Amino acid sequence: MTFTLTSNDITDEGVLPDAQVKAKGDTSPHLKWSGAPEGTRSYAVTCYDPDAPTGSGFWHWTVANIPADVTELKTGASPNGLPPGAVEGRTDYGETGFGGAAPPPGHGPHRYIFTVFAVDTDRLDVTPDNSGAVFGFNLHFHTLAKATITASYENTGLG
């Protein structure tokens, strides 16, 4: 069985909808996954922009400790619709929760990689104060499989 990720809101290789853009909706997308490998004890979700002009990309969302029996997050789950026990980390905006796309005007298209990780432990040692790098470090040692959807968005500066 293959670990897969789908969404009612975003399409792989599509354009990120306005609802997931910081200035237009700032809403976390629906995500649904299936086919996690044996031994999965929890899930984590990230959204990362590798094209941000920072030298290290930009973390838009980090969630860990999603119970293994949860295989879907509804649109707008961040911040108040996550399952009990889930922990959202700090985005590179400096805020906890989902932070929508906001590339600099005229910088060209940016990719937004939404990833669900199948994790081999019930709980990663992360807190709401932790950055995406800390979440990523912990995930590096505990990921069994991952599934992604990548959408793009460009801020043309035209409204």
Image (cartoon, helix red, strand yellow):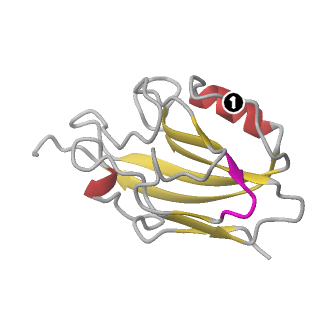
Left or right: residue 108 versus residue 92 is left
Residue occupying the point 74% across, 39% down: 139
Above-or-below relation of 147 to 1: above
Name the outermost residue toward the right.
Answer: 39
User: Residue 105: where, in percent of width, then height?
Assistant: 21, 35
Which residue is identified by label 1?
A: 126
Left or right: residue 73 versus residue 11 is right
Name the outermost residue toward the left.
Answer: 158
Q: What segment carries the magenta color?
A: 65-70
Above-or-below relation of 114 to 23: below
- The answer to which image quadrant residue 99 occupies is top left
Residue occupying the point 67% across, 63% down: 70
User: Residue 134: where, in percent of width, then height?
Assistant: 66, 26
User: Label 1 neighbourhood size at 10 Å, few (<14), some (14-19), many (20+)?
Assistant: some
Q: Amino acid at mark 1?
A: Val
Left or right: residue 19 versus residue 86 is left
- Quarter of the image containing the N terminus? bottom right
Residue occupying the point 32% across, 51% down: 153
Closer to us: 111 or 3: 3
Name the outermost residue toward the bottom.
Answer: 1
In the rendered image, residue 34 lying in the magenta stretch gets the answer no
Find numbered disc 1 in the image and state the secondary structure of the residue it sits on. Answer: loop
Above-or-below relation of 70 to 26: below
Above-or-below relation of 99 to 32: above
Residue occupying the point 59% across, 58% down: 148
User: Residue 7: where, in percent of width, then height?
Assistant: 48, 68
How many discs appear? 1
User: Residue 11: where, in percent of width, then height?
Assistant: 43, 68
Closer to us: 52 or 133: 133
